[in-house]
Amino acid sequence: MSVVAERLQAARPRAARSLPWVVAIGPAAVVVIVLLVVPSTALFLLSFVRFDPLRGIVYSFTLENYLAIARSSLYLQVTLHTLRMAGLVTLACLVLGYPIAYFMARSKSRLAALCAALVVAPLFVSVVIRGFGWMVLLAREGVVNQALVAVGVFAERQQFLYTDPAVLIGLVHILSPFMILPIASVLRGVEPALEEAALNLGATRWGVFRFVVLPLSVPGIMAGAILVYSHAIAAFVLPAMLGSIQTKLMATMLYQQVLVAGNLPFGAALATVLVATTFLLLALVYRFFGVRPW
């Protein structure tokens, strides 16, 4: 009976056998094409047209937008500053979030469930509301300044708001769940017996973490790093609230070009450069570390 079934299965047309896969991925493919591929392609093509302050967008091919970016040291500095800020946010989320993820994955107490709830709960609060909360905390009359002056760290109140550290703190607070949850998910799949075996073979606690736990958690780290970095590099609302015009990031420059100056082609060129730089960094991660960032 099994031989007959195998022959019938082999006799089915290839298109009929592949039909369930088409039905399964078809809707998702349509959504990705309509909401991602088509807008990205349109944005890329828009970056090659001219902008005239009097006539608006002039649909004639030009490389002037990219040449203007290449000739200006300002946009190079803004791009590097954006990449550096996103890297610092990613590193801070990893350093602060890994112990929390390890506790969530390994602890058997009820505090682990409470910790998971505290990590997920801020995701249900608007970024704007959390931004206003940090503005209240970091203001000159805020709780942070009052506490630091009270304990004698500073003799007088400091200007924390509208600085790069304020933007860094706000982004770490908002994006840390995107680092914690993937790492915790991967750590839950690591068998505790591997750690016990390493300890029985004479390894120290630090050795177990360094040579067993940490390498096995690399997929979660990479997933979290990509999520945090991609959000941080394109963040606009929080840097605008906590950094104002003092913090020059690519997202704020895009806002100025598109919504203030109305120069859509130049804004499209800036967005294309930012996306291309991000993909280049991901390719370098795969090339030098041998880890696929997808």
Image (cartoon, rainbow, N blue to C red):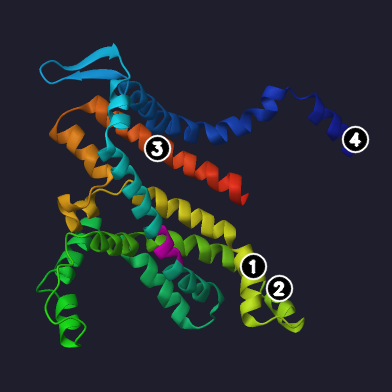
Instruction: Give amino acid for label 4.
Output: Val
Q: Earlier in the sequence, mark 2 or mark 3?
A: 2
Q: Residues within 10 Å of mark 3 (few under 14, many from 20)?
A: some
**In this view, the mark in front (4 or 3):** 3
Residue bearing the label numbered 2: 194
Kindly report the secondary structure that dominates the magenta region of the rendered protein: helix
- Look at the image and give the residue range highlighted in magenta: 90-94
On residue 190, the disc is: 1
Residue bearing the label numbered 3: 275
User: What separation in Å lies between label 2 and label 3 (alpha carbons)?
Assistant: 40 Å
List x then y, in percent, for residue 143: 16, 77
Q: Is residue 208 above or below residue 70?
A: below
Query: Which one is nearer the viewer's eye here, 159 or 208?
Result: 159
Assign the N terminus to one quadrant of the image.
Answer: top right
Query: Which one is nearer the viewer's eye here, 79 or 41?
Result: 79
Q: Earlier in the sequence, mark 2 or mark 4?
A: 4
